[in-house]
Image (spheres, rainbow, N blue to C red):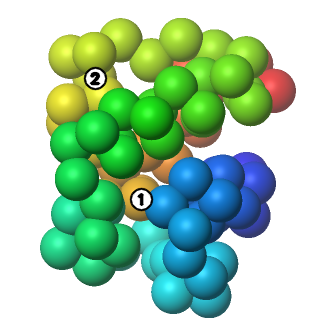
Amino acid sequence: MFEKIKAIIADQLSINEDSITKESSFIEDLGADSLDIMQLIMALEDELEMEIPDEEAEKFVTVGDALNYIKAHNEE
């Protein structure tokens, strides 16, 4: 699951997958702004065929936060 999420993040933010870890902060480490994060959440929802409520998405600070939420709520 992490590899799949990492690929989506790299594609959305136009960065190298190797620079993404579970501890990476979307804003500080990966250079995302609020619009990037919104687009990233939408891409994750589309790719994983799930819905992530805005109030949950706002809690995603690191890649690990997103991964943990997706693992807990995805039926894949």
Residue in view at x 51 percent, y 48 percent? 67
Residue in view at x 66 percent, y 52 percent? 8
Tag 2 near tag 1, CB within 8 Å: no
Q: Is residue 35 above or below residue 54?
A: below
Residue 48, how many percent across, how many down? 72, 28
Closer to the camera, 54 or 10?
Answer: 10
- Residue 57 visible? The answer is yes
Indicate left or right for 17 with 65 as reference.
Answer: right
CA distance for labels 2 and 1:
13 Å
For label 2, the crowd category at 10 Å Cα-Cα, with few meaning under 14, some 14 to 19 and many 20 or more, is few
Query: Which disc number belongs to residue 56?
Result: 2
- Label 1 is placed on what type of residue? Val
Looking at the image, is mark 2 or mark 1 earlier in the sequence? 2
Residue 7, how many percent across, how many down? 71, 61
Residue 35, how many percent across, how many down? 28, 39
Snapshot quadrant of residue 38: top left
Indicate left or right for 30 with 41 as reference.
Answer: left
Count up the numbered dots: 2
Q: Is residue 50 above or below residue 8?
A: above
Residue furthest toward the right? 76
Q: Which residue is mark 1?
A: 63
Residue in view at x 41 percent, y 58 percent? 64
Snapshot quadrant of residue 63: bottom left
